[in-house]
Image (tube, rainbow, N blue to C red):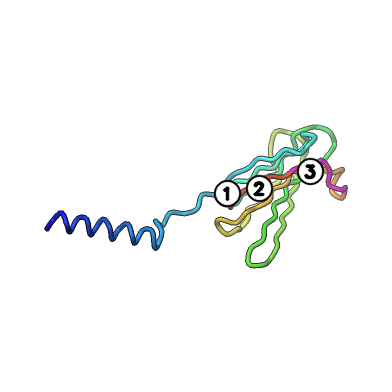
Amino acid sequence: MRRTLSVIVVGLTTVLTLAFGSGTALAGTNVIVDSTNGSAQTQFYAYGEQLYACDTKADGLRAWAIAEWTTGGVHYEVWVADTDGANNNCAGHANLSIPEGVSVRVWACASQGASGAFQYCAYKYATA
C-alpha cells in the first residue's frame, strides 16, 4: 500500500509540475557589443536591465549605446551617450524597465559629437 501511495504522489507531482511549470524565472542574457571601428562599446546586463555606453578610443568620436524592444505592441528605444571621453569608464548609463523574456536589440555606435550621424554601428540581441 505504501509503495502504491508513493508512486501516486510522485506521478501527481510530475503531472502538476508539467502542467503549471516549476516556478523558475526565465534567465536573461547579457551582451557586450563593440562598434565596427572599436570606438564604442555597449554593455547590457539583463538583471535589472542596465545599459552602459563606453567610449573606448581617444579619437574624438562620441560613444552611444542603444537598446530597442517591442512589448504590448509598443516599440521602445533608449539612447545613452558616454560624453566624457575615453577615460576607462562607461559614463553613459540607463536603468531600463523591460518585461522578463523580451528580446532586446543592443547597439554600439559612434558619432561626431552630440548631433553627428551614427556611424560604425553594430548590434547583438539579448533577452531581458
Other residues around mark 2 within 10 Å, as few (<14) / some (14–19) / many (≥20): some
Q: Position of residue 31 (x, y in %)?
A: 63, 42
- Please report the bounds of the magenta region as a residue range: 116-122
- On the rendered image, what quadrant is the N terminus found in? bottom left
The amino acid type of the residue labelled 2 equals Tyr
Residue 120 within the magenta-colored segment of the rendering: yes
Q: Residue at x 68, y 51 (%)?
A: 105
Give the residue pinned by disc 2: 125
Q: Amino acid at mark 3?
A: Cys
Q: Which mark is residue 30?
A: none
Q: Which residue is mark 3?
A: 121
What residue is drawn where x is 71% and y is 46%?
92
Q: Nearer the viewer, residue 96 or 109?
A: 109
Task: Please name which of the two marks, 2 or 1, marks the residue nearer to the observer.
Answer: 2
Give me the C-alpha separation between circle 3 and circle 1. 21 Å
Residue 103, position in %: x, y? 62, 54
Residue at 56 percent across and 51 percent down: it is 48
Mark with earlier residue (3, 1):
1
Quadrant of residue 122 in the image?
Answer: top right
The mark nearer the N terminus, 2 or 1, is 1
Real-space CA distance between mark 3 and mark 2, rounded to the nearest whole angstrom:
14 Å
SS under mark 1: loop
* Mark 2 secondary-structure assignment: strand
